[in-house]
Amino acid sequence: MNQLKQLFTRYKMLALVIAIAVIWLFFSWETDGGFLTPRNLSNLLRQMSITGILACGMVLVIISGEIDLSVGSLLGLLGGVAAILDVVYHLPLPLNLCIVAGCGLLIGLANGCMTAYLRIPSFIVGLGGMLAFRGILLGITGGTTIAPVSPELVYIGQGYLPPLVGIVLGVLLFALTLFLTWRQRSNRALHGLAAHSLVRDVVRVVAIGAVLAGFVYTLNSYDGIPVPVLLLLVLLGVFSYITTQTVFGRRIYSVGSNMEATRLSGINVQAVKLWIFGIMGVMCALAGLVNTARLAAGSPSAGNMGELDAIAACFIGGTSMRGGSGTVYGALLGALVITSLDNGMSMLDVDSYWQMIVKGSILVLAVWVDVSTRAGRR
């Protein structure tokens, strides 16, 4: 049993990819192939982008040993602010984006200040924010939908890249994969470390190339790569770099692994947590903009249950509920699982209460797997 746990832990991401493949095949079978059509996959990835953007920030919060329950309501609030600035005040999109992102940053820093400096548990701060932000949203919108937003804003949520641009993007991503693989092998050789098997690296590069080719071909078969998906890919690159290649990223893991030891080593733990929540606020702003653009309106119910989807995505993707471990790409795979279940069950016309039961069960299962595998290593 312990060997099975160790095997699962070592290949957790592979197991998650296999789980996604099984989910897709099941829904494709049940919908007579409708689930895997280019149109539905394009819509699925567009839906996933909002949960994915939230998960990019949430994974940092959870790795640091905290939680934020306010992100769904904050998404709705900032999306509503964006709609009001666009529809009522007719602000240009760049200025609208800057104002909403600035509001998200300030609110996130306020949450971080209460958690890190005032020592209020992040659970309570998030719970209070979840109620307060939803109340403010209802107040500023009057409980009504704010519409229609401008075509420029709509493009962020509903636009597509031209097919040629999608092909160029795929080629650039593959070239980046080749470069990073070569640099990793060169660095290991430079420091006298044993390089990974050449066959392993070749198989990895070929697999990534095949996924990229299938990704671009499938989306170009419909209308092209959705703009929200491009934004999510950019965030994946940025957050992966932050968590693996920067001092700040290493400090996030250190704070979550052993906060007291991190403090004694001279690291300002409070500042680290403050900026983690600030980043989370900016991600709520981006997700709110994309959601408003996708709906072409600001809705008082926007972001409802969004915090639970983001948290579930992180846990399903392998982020430890105890903090100290997790990856951005794992969280995005978790977001893909959540969105695939939502999309597939909606296509099968499954009752909403069953959808909630299934998602809740999978969340509990993911946390149980995390607890079991970590217990097996002790």
Image (cartoon, helix red, strand yellow):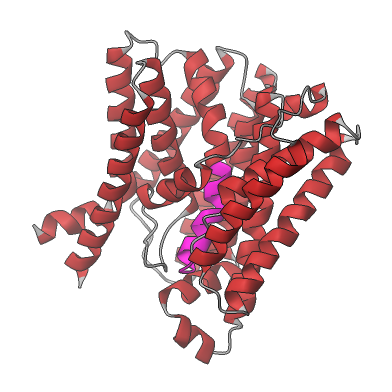
Residue 5 as seen in the image, left or right of residue 287: left
- Residue 40 lies within the magenta run: no
The tally of labels here is 0
* Residue lying furthest left: 1
Of helix, strand and loop, which mostly describes the magenta segment?
A: helix
Tell me what residue is drawn at x 38 percent, y 52 percent.
Answer: 315
Q: Is residue 362 above or below residue 165?
A: below
Q: Is residue 236 visible?
A: no
Q: Is residue 53 above or below residue 345?
A: below
Q: Position of residue 188 (x, y in %)?
A: 45, 65
Tell me what residue is drawn at x 62 percent, y 63 percent.
Answer: 277
Stretch in magenta: 52-66
Residue 158 as seen in the image, left or right of residue 55: right
Residue 151 as seen in the image, left or right of residue 14: right
Query: Residue 246 sits in which quadrant?
Result: bottom right
Q: Position of residue 324 (x, y in %)?
A: 42, 69
